[in-house]
Image (cartoon, helix red, strand yellow):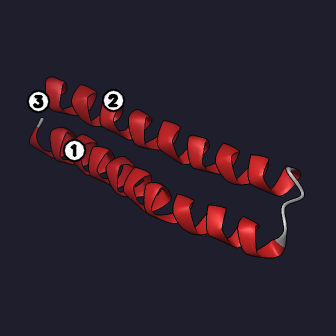
Amino acid sequence: MDWLIWIGAAVSLVGLAGLVWCIVLVWKARRAQLPDAELRERVRRVIPLNMGALLLSVFGLILVIVGIVLG
């Protein structure tokens, strides 16, 4: 089941990259000194991406755990 571990690790890394991307997007929005309403709107648009990246990362970690248990 080594292949399952490697696939899970790759999926987890993609999810982690997505999380870092969300952090960078919000960081750039905060540094732009936007008005409060516009900042809230940008952060509100990033939240679904953040949740999707987190779900992808968790799914990858589940694959790694399943690969370890079955291997």
- Label 1 neighbourhood size at 10 Å, few (<14), some (14-19), many (20+)? many
Q: Name the residue carrying label 1.
A: 63
Q: Residue furthest bottom?
A: 37
Measured as percent of width and height from the top left, residue 31 is found at 87, 51
Residue for point 21% across, 44% down: 63
Measured as percent of width and height from the top left, residue 17 is found at 51, 36
**Dot label at residue 10:** 2
Q: What is the C-alpha distance between the residues marked 2 and 3?
A: 15 Å
Tally of numbered tags: 3
Label 1 sits on a secondary structure element that is helix
Task: Name the front one of labels 3 and 1.
Answer: 1
Label 3 sits on a secondary structure element that is loop
Front residue (pair 7, 20): 20
Q: Quadrant of the C terminus?
A: top left
Q: Which numbered disc flags the more N-terminal residue, 2 or 3?
A: 3
Front residue (pair 65, 55): 55
Task: Name the front one of labels 2 and 3.
Answer: 2
* Up/down of 2 relative to 20, above or below: above
- Label 3 neighbourhood size at 10 Å, few (<14), some (14-19), many (20+)? few
**Dot label at residue 1:** 3
Q: What residue type is disc 1 on?
A: Leu
Front residue (pair 36, 4): 36
Residue for point 42% across, 50% down: 53
Q: What is the C-alpha distance between the residues marked 3 and 1?
A: 10 Å
Residue for point 69% across, 72% down: 40
Q: Are marks 3 and 1 in contact (CB under 8 Å)?
A: no
Q: What residue type is disc 3 on?
A: Met
